[in-house]
Amino acid sequence: MKRSIILAMTLVLFSGCMPEPTPTPQKACMSSAQLSSYSYDYLSRVAKMLREDKKNIDTFEGFITAMKVTVDNYADMIKSSVYISNVVRFLPIPYAGEVSNTTKLISKTALHLNVAAVALDRYKKSSATFLDRFDKLNRTTAQPEDLAKLATYADSELLSDARDLQIALQKISSSTATMAATTQGISDALDTTGNYVNQAKSYVGFQASAVSTSDKTKVSENRNSINAKMGQLNQKIASLENSADMHRLNIEKAHIYADLAVQLNQ
């Protein structure tokens, strides 16, 4: 229904395309070849953007690997220091109320990274398939049916894979934000010379302890690394969203023109 409405609106935009009540046979204002040419042009825009984005997409793989290192460092920071582990127990931050929940956060983030790696691989493959099929077409000889099939592939596979990758990255962003909040909470506790944590530990019967310089250094480095990765991640998500929006618009227009060309041929 939606596509039928769009097709009807498109026909209205074609000046002289709507038949008038007259006994004289009317010719289409645009030929099938012209419509196919327009469809090809919009698909060429998708191909051009995919090639321009290729370098950026290729960096995603390295970024995911770097994020895994950051998550490992975060886990090591929590486990390597008894003091930091106890700090985490008393932080009023989501997922950080207990060390066990922090471990769950680490596992969840690692899982999201693995899912993102798989989604990235699928998106790269569907992009390569689209480009390979597009390169076999010619602007002047491409058949409407072939253009429509490629537009359908782009709509059902390429955009779907891009969306899956976007969702996977957003999940990483969410869990990474919680990691950042936890690390900042630990840093704040250490900057106050541990008074907050020591008071909490004394309340539940734990012995107060001193903060080591090594602990502060680990937390500071971890916090800076997570914040830097979060900035990069949000940029990548925004870039992917912008590309997907442009792809969706061009693919929809390519589909409309190809469908009109097929109908004229029929």
Image (tube, rainbow, N blue to C red):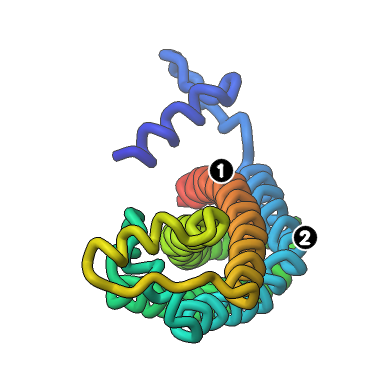
- In terms of depth relative to the viewer, which is nearer, 151 or 138? 151
- Looking at the picture, which amino acid does disc 2 mark? Glu
Q: Residue at x 61, y 47 (%)?
A: 242
Query: At which x and y percent is residue 38?
Result: 67, 45
Query: At which x and y percent is residue 54?
Result: 73, 68
Q: Residue at x 67, y 43 (%)?
A: 34
Element on which disc 1 rests? helix
Q: Is residue 102 visible?
A: yes
Is 163 located above or below residue 121 in the figure? above
Element on which disc 2 rests? helix
Is 28 located above or below residue 92 in the figure? above
Which residue, as the protein is rendered here, is positioned at the far left?
204
Which mark's residue is nearer the viewer, 1 or 2?
2
Estimate how packed mark 1 is, as few (under 14), some (14 to 19) or many (20 or more) residues with alpha carbons within 10 Å.
few
Question: Mark 2 and mark 1 in contact (Cβ < 8 Å)?
Answer: no
Q: Which residue is mark 2?
A: 52
Q: Is residue 160 visible?
A: no
Q: Quadrant of residue 101?
A: bottom left
Total labels: the figure holds 2
- In terms of depth relative to the viewer, which is nearer, 238 or 72? 72
Q: Is residue 207 left or right of residue 212?
A: left
Give the number of the disc on residue 249: 1
- Looking at the picture, which amino acid does disc 1 mark? Leu
Query: At which x and y percent is residue 219?
Result: 58, 68
Quadrant of the image containing the N terminus = top left
Is 139 located above or below residue 246 in the figure? below
Estimate how packed mark 2 is, as few (under 14), some (14 to 19) or many (20 or more) residues with alpha carbons within 10 Å.
few
Disc 1 from disc 2: Cα separation: 17 Å
- In terms of depth relative to the viewer, which is nearer, 184 or 140? 184
Mark 1 / mark 2, whichever is N-terminal: 2
